[in-house]
Image (cartoon, rainbow, N blue to C red):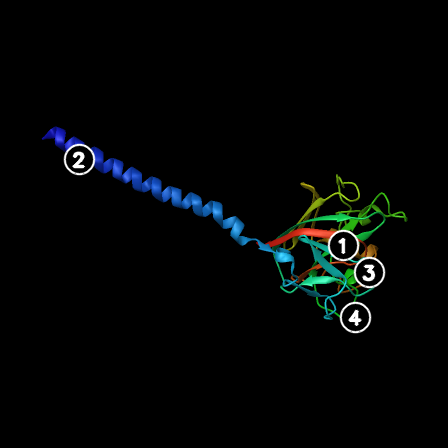
Amino acid sequence: MQTLKSFSLSMATLALLSCSANEQSKTENTEVETPSSEWIQLTDGNILDHWEMYDGSEIKGWRFENGELIASGAGWDAGEDLITKNSYENFELELEWKIEEANSSGIFYYVQKSDSTPIYENAPEYQVLDDKGWPDQMKPNQLTAGSYSMYAPEGAEVRPVGEWNSTKIIVQYPHVEHWLNGKKVVGYEFGSEDWKSRKAAGKWAEVPDYGIAKSGHIGLQNAGLVTYRNVKIKEL
């Protein structure tokens, strides 16, 4: 009888361990799958369903080709900048870009819709530029991956013209991070004393609404010849 009882207890223990392992497996699988389901692909399917023009007009100046979103290089004030249809507060944005020689563009966040204010006066900008080929001397806070005219990138390593760069922007208000090719190069806090002093002393001193929004759209500037791909975002 003692042997039979021991055998029964052993079988019961194995059954419990098996159930526990199954439950753990289910939990592990769920944890693996969850992050990928959070991402929204903004350049999926060679269509602009996630996008609209910043000034509210018909989409122009952009085309899709083999999964790549290509700007025509219309110019800073041509009114051909794209913004996402959705607005975001706390988010992580990832994308890749490449630029042609002596050209520029910008990635904007917390954009407010407007048909009169240039996008670069409307919202903070992650600078995209051919640093080496640009014909004019730029300030450190106007170089690639910097917060344009606010914070200079530190340790940024930009790939040569025509090669793909990877960008990541993380915003958990008021904290902001700019990443370039796997390296964090900018970090700042909206509304901090440092941020206020930089704004007051720089290009945005006479632009009272610059950087005051706490949510908004993502924007891509059609200033120069630039190509974007694999644009995706997740809310935090």
- Of mark 4 and mark 2, the one earlier in the sequence is 2
**Res. 106 mark:** 1
What percent of the width, then of the height, locates residue 33?
48, 48
- Of mark 3 and mark 2, the one earlier in the sequence is 2
Identify the amino acid type marked 1: Gly
Element carrying mark 3: loop
x 44%, y 48%: residue: 30
- Of mark 4 and mark 3, the one earlier in the sequence is 3
Label 4 – label 2 distance at C-alpha: 80 Å
Answer yes or no: do the residues labelled 4 and 2 have beta carbons within 8 Å? no
What residue sits right under mark 4 in the picture?
116
Comparing 181 with 49, the one in front is 49
What residue sits right under mark 2 in the picture?
8
x 43%, y 43%: residue: 28
Identify the amino acid type marked 3: Ala
**Res. 74 mark:** 3
Count residues near mark 4 (Cα–Cα under 10 Å), then give few for <14, some for 14-19, many for 20+: few
